[in-house]
Amino acid sequence: MAEWEPVLLANVHRPNSEKIGTYLAHGGYQALRKALSMSPEAVVAEVKASGLRGRGGAGFPTGVKWGFLPPDAPVKYLAVNTDEGEPGTFKDRLIVERDPHAILEGVIIAAYAIGAHRAFVYIRGEFFLGVKRWIKAIADAYQHGFLGKDILGSGFDLDVSVHRGAGAYICGEETAMLESLEGKRGQPRLKPPYPAQVGLWGRPTIVQNVETLANVPHIILRGAAWYASIGTEQSKGPKIFCVSGHVNRPGNYELPLGTPLREIIEKYAGGVRYGRHIKAVIPGGVSTPMLTARQIDVPMAFETLAAAGSALGTGAVIVMDETTDMVEVARRITDFFVHESCGACVPCRLGGFRMLERLEAIARGRGRPDDLAKLESLARGISGLTFCPLGTGMCEPVLSGLALYRDEFVARLNTAAKR
Amino acid sequence: MANVSTVFREIGAVVQAMGVTLRALLAGPLTVQYPEQPIAVYPRFRARHELRRYENGLERCIGCMLCEAACPTGAIHVEAAENDPAHPVSPGERYAKVYEVNLMRCVFCGDCETACPVEAIVLGHDFELAVYDRDGFLLTKEQLLNPKVPNVVVRAE
Amino acid sequence: MPDQVTLTIDDVKVTVPAGTLVVDAAKAAGIDIPVFCSHPKLDPLGACRMCLVEFVGSRGSRLDTACTVRVAEGMAVRTNTEQVKAVREANLGFILINHPLDCPICDKGGECPLQDQTMAYGPGVSQFVEPKRHKNKRYPISDLILLDQERCILCWRCIRYLEEWEDKPQLGLFERGGETMIDTFPGQPVDAKTSGSIIDICPVGALTNRVARFRYRPWELKKTPSVCNHCPVGCNLRLDERVHALRRIVARENMAVNDEWICDKGRFVHQFVDHPERLKKPLVRDAQRGTLREATWDEALDRVVEKLGALVEANGPNTVGGIASPRVSNEAAYLFQKFFRALVGTNNVDFAGGSAVRAWPTGLSAITDIARSDLIVLVGFDPSEAAPLLAVHIKRVVLRKGAKLLIIHPRRIELAKYPGAYLPVLPGNEAALLGELAAAVQASKGVRGQEARGKQAARNPQSPGPGPQYPDVVALLAAAKSPLFIYGPDVARGERGRATVAALLNLATALGQGDKLAYIGAGANEQGVRDMGLLPDTLPGYAPVSDAAVRERLGKLWGLQPPAEAGQTCARMIGGGVKGLFVMGDNLAALPAVAEALRKLDFLVVQDLFLTETAQLADVVLPACSFAEADGTYTNLERRVQRGPQGIRAVGESKADWAILTALAEKWLAAEGRGDRSGVAPAAAPELPDWKRKKRKAKTGPAAKPWNYPTAQSVLEEIGKAVPFYATMRWEALGEGGLQWSARDLRVGVRDSGLSNTQSPTSNPRPGEFLLVSSPLFWDASLFMQYAADQVRQLIPAPFVALNPADLATAKLAEGSQMTLTSPHGSVILTLKADASVQPGTVWIPATLPGLPAETLGGGRGEPISVVVR
């Protein structure tokens, strides 16, 4: 495969990349002009044809989702999910801080396509710079006539506003985000009905991830066929991979979907530091199951990773070398999820902290002989049985850690037994 | 000669029998001079009920009425009330405002002891239950908390 | 979508309506799926994960919550697999991780779903040895409810009840993860009027009733299904008795009346039933000392017969009368009026708020009609304060079905925040406003348009002009397909009330909805008391006293015919129209002016629960039973006759109202020397006083039939003969849900519907003067509240007067200051409050505050009262 010329991250390294002038100078808002000249149905069809799948983790086909909106609904909303909280993920932050207009253009096109006249940006409260950049970008877009009444003389109106979250990971889940946007406690809603039917304030709402929206202008500008030519059978387009952990050059790498994990780690991220060997890789953020060193030839695409027993998630590749303590990994990740559990449903709220207690005991060498069995029984009582995927995500590091590196856990127990 | 041996054998039997009598003569009286002398009872003997306290003086009884539910004869009557947090009668939120045992109904089965979750009600060793009028058979909480003989310790806490 | 869906649950085929939740379908199939968060009356949530069951599909089976998935054709569900069993065990294990297991002292112990389900589906042993998390125990969320955050399993039922039914989201989840707990918002205790319902629906003992706390264990309660005696909704409740004391009241489901909720008055105000101050023996006034002393029933009843009889003998039957309370049972009300009509020979029977109020005799068409209506017109009636369960139903139809509310009230009542229109009206101007609306509706419809326009033009120029919402209101009325028109006693009193009701009827008729007019009274059995003819001009069954045919029919039943001329009203009897008065269950003398009038009586009998101010003035006090101690039937505002069986033993020697009246009548008959003497001690005969002996010789002609009522049921049987539409009301037939008599059975001619508004409209008050509004307040100082438990009594507000903040500013008055209020009727000193719900130019003094300030100033007389505030 030829060297990939970045599309989504094309602007981020330019000086003053966040300014609207810079964006306009490099072909910004051309896609918007083109989209406004098309019919909304044509825009939806184009996105559908491109095969774009949501980049927030679930990978739902974007065009299909847009098609779910009831066409006769008088009021529809677009919600932009900038609540990037998955540990290991830092792609949205980069785009928001360095190239906010790229997303905003996608927002306007998406709103035009679905017929929404109001878009809400929900941004993680800790992204202080991101909030500033979003607000500035929106203000500039209003000034240039890309937002407000009668955008570019097309007769299409759109207002966008920015809302800061209060620091809950669960608000990255789309329905919890909608609850939070409504000013309520951030916790997931019952699905169905899905937000496309009953969303924000009971109105049909499309919730999109930042990276997904950043793809939209390119699809419009270069056409669905170009976009569909990138990637694999079921995973189209470029994807930003956030590589972190024990690599020499951690960072965001934009590559076509289907790029093998080994290539990402070894070619782009500069390989494992100090020449050590890979022990495990989390391929898509901490709520996806781990892969072992033997599995790193897997192509990074939705379907291939699912076949490998994991998931693409947000594309956050966390590399762990041979020195990594897998018990500590499980404990740290579980700690995160237990802290972020919203407390709404029983298994996640109550099972989680018991699991953490056991992991802490094992990590400190105080594990009891039956603790592994207890951990597994706890995880089985949580995984898949919770209201939202957070509970399942909480169990993945424990279950896959126990399945792949059980001896490490057992070793900790043995030292406890010797005492 | 058979007669002589028979005579000796019978004398022997008489002496043997008298031996029992003589031993009994020397053994002293078995009668316990009750009520001047107390009678020892077996450790698990079940007699008059007692309500126990904790060492800090709080009543054990929490007024849960499980003894009342367990009682096969309906001899127990409990009325619970809420503790004043400043002056608690028992630990926790609830105490027994009224605790009555009707000894005329009680069959001393000990089910109340078994039912009690805090080991508050126990059957003590005081079997001297005669009173001069029928009202006396109704033990009040005051009487139950202050038994004549000290509380039986079922289990050291 | 087909209406009926067939699915398979554990190999059982079950057909249920489409849209049913799987958990309910399983219930229909007789299969138990354990739940905590799911509740049939609340929206699905899926938080407790207890109801996870296997859905078997073409792609294998998956687990999902039965409480959130709706049935589909051909769905296959398995609830008894190993996987489901394991999930339930794991989940119960999780729930019990932090549950404190203080079951022995928990009020829920014995009726706790968590206990039951742990026994049925639990793991048996705990795998946890770690300490439990500690949160607040005994944490008050209101004056009436305690929260135990440790026991709470966070099913959100309480949160959802307050949100979905009360529309008062006053509880919420705080913190997150394992620290999550339910709490109130800072400084905002739960004050929903039906807040106690959350105690009933709590699946654990986290929410406890502060009044009933620790007073019972569920297994030793004797549970009697009964009806509430506080307001005319007639909510179904259950009396829980233990050792002859009423331990608590909980709600009982009746989908036609109260769903399964009851208000906080119904739930928490019951200590009056076994209050230590209850009258336990009859009292008679000692002739020498002039004080009340205890007496036997015989002595007390003999005294009543003797004194009342002497007054009748000396001055004629029109000099005695009876005033009852609209709380009493149908049986008591019937016998009360029968005693006066058939034995004494007078129509002098009434109740406070009886003949003075123009009540629509058929009440509300049905409470369930609220859920079917798209517009509810409330005129001078505040359901939130007067009948909270109606407010719950109204809020539900507004929130769920988008119904609109048109509120015409002098105060911006709580329901005025909902979509629709609020028309502020000065007290006394309701008729004018309604007349204008009716005219405008007619004009807009083009029906008799010419005439209506003419009327509108001739409108009194002084009357306040229609508000800016006027066209909207007409549109609202015209668009309504199934409206309900509800009015309360505040706008129906006196002559002005007659005009208001006539105007309202005109409006309803103009819209073609004349049958949707409803009056909702104040007394718990006001409908029944009216049905029983406890009115001076109306016989049982709403026949006017002038109706000779009905009088004859009743004469055959009773032995003696009631008189043909109307009797005296309540106000006239108090105002000196009678010399002897029998007061049953009403504390008239709480108002000093009335007490003064009652002192002038020659003879006063009071039959009540307590030694009230009225009883203190009485010559004979008869101790009566509360609703909980006697059998009786009660008719609610939708004409539903419901049973209120005896739930606890009568306190002391007190007797049921109907039993006292029966005993009295027997003595009366015996004294007259006629009638059946069984049941009356024959020894009474030789001691007859002189007046009776004379009478015995003198009287000839028709005789009163004997009163032979061994039970309340036998009284009901006679009511069935006296009141045609009660003919089918038999104690057994009423069942636990009651029976409604059909409004069609009562053909009341609209006798004065054509009455036009002859009342001059209230003009805007002069500066410094305010118009008195005395609409009710939920927590008032009524008799039952005064004898309620301490926790409830502290909710009775100190007497206050509320003014609009703008008026306060104009008059330079400070909130919290003590002001003297003077009206032509009296003067009171009250604490000033600012309240934006009060209209400028008016003062709001709720009815029945301690000391009755509103009544002292003349409130509740059906005329505008001008009040000077100094």
Image (cartoon, helix red, strand yellow):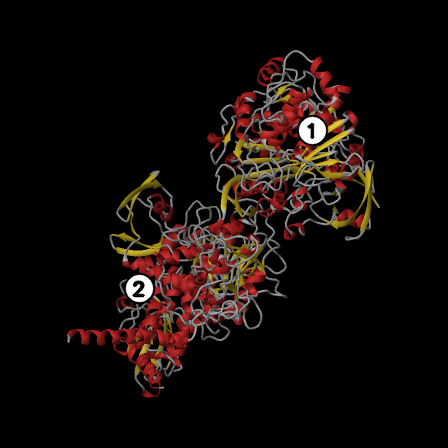
**Mark 2 = which residue?**
A235
Give left or right: position of C526 versus B36. right
Q: Secondary structure at mark 2?
A: loop
Say the numbered circle drawn on residue A264. Answer: none
* Quadrant including the N terminus of chain A: bottom left
> Residue A99: x and y, percent?
47, 69
Q: Is residue A30 above or below residue C633?
A: below
Frontmost of labels 2 and 1 is 1
Q: Residue at x 42, y 69 (%)?
A: B42
| Tally of marks | 2
Q: CA distance from mark 2 to mark 1?
A: 99 Å
> Residue C673: x and y, percent?
66, 19
Quick check: do tags 2 and 1 share a chain? no
Which image quadrant is residue C443 in? top right
Q: Residue at x 59, y 49 (%)?
A: C192
**Mark 1 = which residue?**
C302
